Image: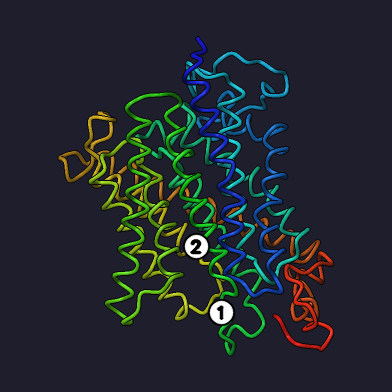
Amino acid sequence: MIDRTDTLFVMCCATMALLMTPAMGLFFAGMVRRKNVLSTFLGCLVPLGVVTLQWLVLGQGLAFGGDLFGGLIGAPDWSMLRGRFEPRPDLTATVPGPLALAFEMLAAAFAAALVSSAGAERAKSWSMAVVVILWTTLVYDPLAHWMWSPDGWLRRLGARDFGGGLVVHASAGAAALCVAVAVGKRRGADVDSLRPHNLPLTAIGTALLWFAWLGFNAGRAWGVSTIAAAAFLSTLVAGAAGMLAWILVERATTGKATFLGGCTGVVAGLVGSSAGAGMVGPGVAIVLGAGAALFSHAAILIKSRLDYDDSLDVFGVHGIGGITAAIGLGLLAGSDLEPSAVGLFNGRVELILAQLAAVGAVVAYSVLVTWAILFAVDRTMGLRVPPEAEELGLDVALHGQRAYVMGDGERLGMDYR
């Protein structure tokens, strides 16, 4: 039976969650060179439009339709298009079905935007749009079924993922690593610093992300409840813990706590909150947020030694952070919020074994299928822009516009890249 209070609550949370994808676009846009600001932002915004339509036509059924093949995939389901507004018992008993599925749509769009952003400053926009459609259909939708559908095989195995630590972040992070390797390094990555051009823009994105993430995690409780309040508080404190952990380790290792590090720490902490936001208390959330930030920081330090160019650190922050969150939940869970999920440190081994199995399955599946998608798109459309377009900047080369008009500087031939 539809509950008006729960419906209004989820609708407000969905409105907040809608900001996540453009907020991440602002976060990333500040980190690139000014000649690629618009293309980087569009790398997040376009997936929001593409996945919205994909979800209406196909995604909702593959993720949450009737089970096929023993928990591997769902059947096509056009309930949103048909306007059937009764609740979906498999998701929530008190919120209209289309609203619940629309909320899930926003998670799919955010994951796709992370994958698309891994090719920032050198990938073809049309090619990445095709990659987004194929990745959402062939990778994200099945993984959502595995973990979030009652019939999914990983859920039946006992794995838990409250807000997308695995389904969204680990899967998208693993796919982003594939994109970064397949597209290759940016021109000059080995000799130029390629510094961020506008950190205040990244700060605005960070603030909006933190705000939107509160709605996203709380809304997954599907109503006004203790679980929603716990998810809200866990998200808030995990972001704070991630920021403090990042700047403290920077201060200890380099002598300086950087502004970008603080912003990145917030995002890493939010990723750390995702897997268990509505299933753990604030103390555990602090540990998960700080732990995700520390492991993400280590992953970014190691990146230079592995010789790949993940220009926006999607794998380092979201991939490693999501994996850390999922495993951390298996170790630390023990709250009364979810009696069936008790971690290793509280006396039960079943959850950590299920979480480890889920991490392995999600990452392996995402990597294998993403590589196949990238291979096919590269052979047919090409993944990378020509060298002259990359040198000019993707904003002008692909979109015919600049983010900033610098007055007489451009007329005088000054370089504002």
Nearest to the eye among marks 2 and 1: give it: 1
Q: CA distance from mark 2 to mark 1?
A: 19 Å
Q: Residue at x 47, y 20 (%)?
A: 6
Taking 73 as reference, is 326 above or below it? Answer: below
Circle count: 2
Figure quadrant of residue 335:
top left
Please give the name of the residue rendered at 81% of the width and 64% of the height, measured from the top-left corner: 399
Whether residue 165 sits left or right of residue 47 in the image: it is left
Dot 1 corresponds to which residue? 195
What residue type is disc 1 on? Arg
Residue at the spot 21% in from the left edge and 37% down from the top edge: 334
Q: Position of residue 194 (x, y in %)?
A: 59, 81
The residue that label 2 is drawn on is 315
On the image, the x and y values in percent for residue 5 come to 47, 18
Image coordinates for residue 61, horizontal then vertical, percent: 63, 29
Q: Is residue 348 visible?
A: yes
- Residue 159 in view here: no
